[in-house]
Image (tube, helix red, strand yellow):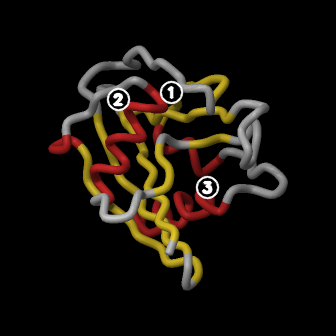
Amino acid sequence: MKIVAKALIRDGAGDLLLLRRGLTHPNFPEHVDFPGGEVEPDEPHIEAVRREIREETGLDIPLDDIQQVFLKQLADDLTHVVFLASTPNNKPEVELSWEHSGFEWIPFDQFSALALPEGVDTYHLTVLDYLDQAKA
């Protein structure tokens, strides 16, 4: 079974970190992305997302500032786990990995209004499902 864990990172002002996948990314190049990736066998989900945050952004977020907020089973062999993470600094410095070509901080409530790219990553849809549930 494949488990993908990603983090919605909010800064001290409440803005959301969006990454932009690079042209060489093997999946959904140039699409909006969040820090995260596949969970290794026997790796706790929260440890996986914390590791991925560090690898992809250079941000070192303490475990106490990361919480699981949503889980979605897409198929028998695929699960998405969404985490909410926070950093006390406003727009902290981000050091991107090879996977991403850019980033931006946007008001958290504006993510739902972004246009969906053609052939959108299912994780993008999972985050929208989480945000819809959180509004209810």
Label 3 vs label 2, nearer the camera: 3
Pick whichever of labels 1 and 3 is earlier in the sequence.
Answer: 1
For disc 2, the marked residue is 11
- Density class for disc 1 (Cα within 10 Å; few <14, some 14-19, many ≥20) is some
Q: Amino acid at mark 3?
A: His
109 with respect to 59 (left or right): right
Q: Residue at x 51, y 27 (%)?
A: 105
The residues tagged by marks 3 and 2 sit, at their Cα atoms, a distance apart of: 20 Å
Residue 21 picture location, percent across and down? 67, 35
Q: Residue furthest top?
A: 93
Q: Name the residue nearer the viewer: 92 or 41.
A: 41
Q: Residue furthest left?
A: 64
From this view, report whether residue 65 is shown above or below residue 103. Answer: below
SS class, disc 2: loop
Number of marks in the image? 3
Q: Residue furthest bottom?
A: 76
For disc 1, the marked residue is 105
Residue 123 picture location, percent across and down? 59, 59
Do labels 2 and 1 touch, CB within 8 Å?
A: yes
126 with respect to 119 (left or right): left
Q: Amino acid at mark 1?
A: Trp
SS class, disc 3: helix
For disc 3, the marked residue is 124
- Density class for disc 2 (Cα within 10 Å; few <14, some 14-19, many ≥20) is many
SS class, disc 1: strand
